[in-house]
Amino acid sequence: MPEVDVDEARRQCVLIEKGLAYSKQQLIAHRSKLWKLLEHSIEAVNELIEVSSDVHVVDKERQEFDKVLQEFTDITAVYKRLLTDEELSAVEVELDRLDKVIADFKTSVYTWLRQQKSNSNRSVISVRTNATPGKSSKRSSAVSDSRMRQLAKLAALETSKRLQIWRLN
């Protein structure tokens, strides 16, 4: 049976501990960087919401936020796997706070996007649905949205046709 050098085995263990500590440090640094990006993105979207009514610009920024958030979530999952139970419980408290910040932000953005969509639908054209007043359903809402899109396309085509006729005269 080959002899095992106790010092060598201990050194390997130390290297593993050092590697684990190094990995934790790297993940902490990366998470911190990603969180700062998320904070800047939240600020940027909130500023856009205050000064702009362009849904596409806000939605594009929200999508960028979601990409960074996904990377943050993935890194956090890897980081949590390296932690001891004691360390994990401390990190969970921080993550709960961050989850609340993210949930509040997403709620405000989605509320704003729905309001803008609703406002733009009302400004495009007013359409009466065949639904009974006071009773709304998902189906009548979907029919209404589809009908509004069709009427908007029709209005755009009619305007385009009138413009072409006007140019010919």
Image: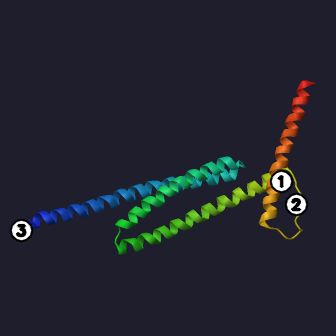
User: Which numbered tag is attached to residue 1?
Assistant: 3
Q: Answer whether labels 3 and 2 touch (C-beta < 8 Å).
A: no
Name the amino acid, label 2.
Thr
Element marked by disc 3:
loop
Which quarter of the rendered picture does the C terminus lie within? top right
**Residue at (88%, 54%) from the top-left corner?**
126
User: Which numbered tag is attached to residue 147?
Assistant: 1
Separation of marks 1 and 3 at Cα, in angstroms = 83 Å
- Mark before the other along the chain sequence, 2 or 1: 2
Instruction: Report whether 89 appears left or right of 118.
Output: left
Residue 26 image position (x, y, % from top left): 35, 56
**Near-viewer residue (16 or 159):** 159
> Residue under circle 2?
129
How many other residues sit within 10 Å of disc 2, few (<14), some (14-19) or many (≥20)?
few
Name the amino acid, label 3.
Met
Q: How many marks?
A: 3
